[in-house]
Image (spheres, helix red, strand yellow):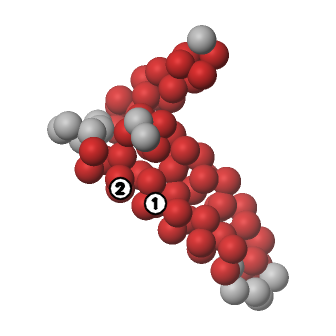
Amino acid sequence: MDSDLMLVIGLIVCALSLPSVIGAISEGRAPRTASIAILVGGLLVVLALSRHPGGYAIDEIPQVFFRVIGRLLH
């Protein structure tokens, strides 16, 4: 699997799980499902960082998103 794609999917999964964490905590429930999603997303991000030579810089992340979207559209 491509490291750019793993990074994008991992960041999206982590971002989408944040509302679930906030909702569960505000209702007094344990955020089990959101915790699993954050774990999976974090694992994908760590794998992407370890497989990409030199890692990723913070300012490079938007370019990675555009590269992945561009590849999916073409």
Q: Which mark is residue 42?
A: 1
Q: Is residue 52 left or right of residue 54?
A: right
Would you call the spot at circle 1 few (<14 residues within 10 Å), some (14-19), or many (20 or more)? some
Looking at the rendered structure, the kind of residue marked 1 is: Gly
Residue lying furthest left: 54
Q: Is residue 25 left or right of residue 44?
A: right
Percent of width and height locating residue 48: 36, 46
Percent of width and height locating residue 63: 43, 23
Q: Residue at x 68, y 79 (%)?
A: 31
Q: Quadrant of residue 34?
A: bottom right
Would you call the spot at circle 2 few (<14 residues within 10 Å), some (14-19), or many (20 or more)? some
Q: In the rendered view of the protein, which quadrant contains the N terminus?
A: top left
Q: Which mark is residue 14?
A: none
Q: Nearer the viewer, residue 8 or 25?
A: 8
Q: Residue at x 27, y 45 (%)?
A: 51
**Residue at mark 2:** 46
Q: Quadrant of residue 27?
A: bottom right
Residue 49 visible in the current orientation: yes
Relative to 12, residue 72 above or below: above
Percent of width and height locating residue 32: 67, 80
Task: Determine the CA span between mark 1 and mark 2.
Answer: 6 Å
Looking at the rendered structure, the kind of residue marked 2 is: Val
Q: Residue at x 43, y 61 (%)?
A: 43
Relative to 9, residue 19 above or below: below
Residue 66 visible in the current orientation: no
Q: Residue at x 20, y 37 (%)?
A: 53
Q: Quadrant of residue 20?
A: bottom right
| Mark 1: secondary structure | helix
Q: Is residue 64 left or right of residue 30?
A: left
Relative to 53, residue 46 above or below: below
